[in-house]
Each structure stands twice: as C-alpha cells, then as structure tokens.
Image: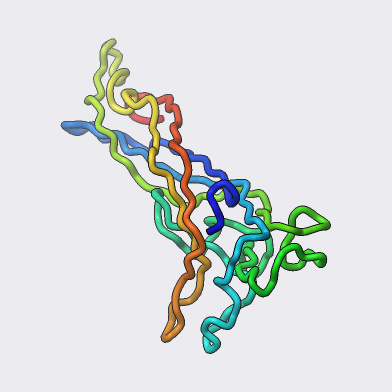
Amino acid sequence: MLGSMSLATAIAAMSVLLSVPALPATCRLSVAGLNRERFVPGWAPLGQECGMEEPLCFHSAPFGNWGVDSNYGTRVDGDQFQGWHYGDGHHQWNSCTYFYPCPDSSCRYCNYPWPSCTDQKTIGAVNTHGSKYVDVWVSCPVDTDGDGDCDQGGCKDVWAYGENNNWVRLFELDFDIFWCHADDYVDTLYFPPTEVNLFCEPGYC
C-alpha cells in the first residue's frame, strides 16, 4: 500500500448550476473532486505495468496512466491523476518499481528531487478526478419586496456544501480485450471531510 499521506492531497470544488422552483423545490449542485500535489514515494512497491504479467498483451512498461474511482465519479482514460512522464497522450507514473526502482541516478524512471530522483512527483496541475450532481431541498423562491424578482428561498437557502466521506481508488489503466485483463488496482486513499461556502441567489450561485 502506498499510504494516503504519501500519495496526494485533495481539495473539493463545487458550483451551483440551476434551481428548480417546483413543489418542493430543489437546488441542483454540480460537485467536483479535485486533486493536486500528487506524490509517489520511491519505496512504494508497484508492479502494475511490468510487461510480464500477461506476455501476450500490450504493456508499455514501466509507465502507465492512472485513473480514479471516487465518491465523485468513476475512472476514465483521461487526466484524473496525472503523473510526470509523458507518453501515449498522458503524464504517466512509473508503475513497475519492482524492476525499475528508485532511486534512479539517470532520473529516467523517477523524477524527484533532481538530481537524486528518489521519488515520483506530479507535473503540478490540478486534476478533476470526478463530478456529480446533488439535489438539495430548498424552499420555493419568493418575491418579498414586490419588484417582480424572487429575492428569498430557492438556492439562497444553500449557504454551504460538504462531503464527509472522501476517498480515491487508483488504477493503472489498460485495454480490456480478449484474454487481457483490465485496469490494475494501485491503492485507495482517504481524506478528511471538506466543506465549501456558497454565496447564492434564489436562482443561481
């Protein structure tokens, strides 16, 4: 296991897309989970992309793109958890430290800190690892001052949103064809609760 304190820190971001003035009314939030400062210690035992597990399948050992399942969504072959080595259109991780270990004096298989290259560290971008819609019950929007515009209720009832159970499950991504197995599990990370303050009007934030 890599350990949640070693691999990454996470932040949560969210925005309100729309409200539905129905009976009862709901305010629909678009909630996204973000990650940054991704880091893999050199001692982490990784054997997900060594090229010998399935000799008849294509593997680009030792580097692989990592996808994410989380409380915000499911994995995709995109940029959910970027590494540092560019290949196949993504910034990848050394996913076979069994045979391509750190420290690496050539800095070919590990990149941080230079020039000792004892660990792996992300290129630095903030990644979105998932998003979802959340409907929050609110009161119906009302016009209290008679100017024709609602000024109370609706999304204005929502002043904050939080997630108490934040987790990220990492996979080294592979093709799932014929006898070749699909994505390889790497590790699961857990994070503390997050809360974001919102400043909303009845119909939007």
Image-based side of 28 in relation to 110, left or right: left
| Image location (x, y in percent) of residue 198 | 43, 27
Give the colour scheme shown: rainbow
Vertical relation: 29 (above or below) 138: below
- Residue 129 location (% of width, % of height): 49, 52
In the displayed structure image, the side of residue 64 where residue 151 appears, left or right? left
Is the residue 130 above or below the residue 106 in the image?
above
User: Going 39% across and 49% down the picture, which residue do you hit?
Assistant: 71
* Quarter of the image where the C terminus is located: top left
| Residue drawn at point x = 57 percent, y = 65 percent | 65
Percent x, y for residue 177? 43, 82
How far across and down, in percent of the image, does residue 66 sit?
Answer: 54, 63
For the image shown, how many numbered marks are present on the structure? 0
Report the residue at 38% width, 25% height from top: 159
Most extreme residue toward the bottom, as rendered? 56
Side of 48 where 136 appears, left or right: left
Toward the left, the furthest residue is 23
User: Residue 152 vs residue 171: left or right?
Assistant: left
Name the residue at 51% across, 45% down: 34
Q: Nearer the viewer, residue 106 or 198?
A: 106
Looking at the image, residue 197 lies above or below residue 49: above
Please say if 190 is above or below 106: above
Give 62 or 134, whichever is nearer the viewer.
62
Between residue 46 and residue 205, name the one nearer to us.
46
Residue lying furthest top: 145
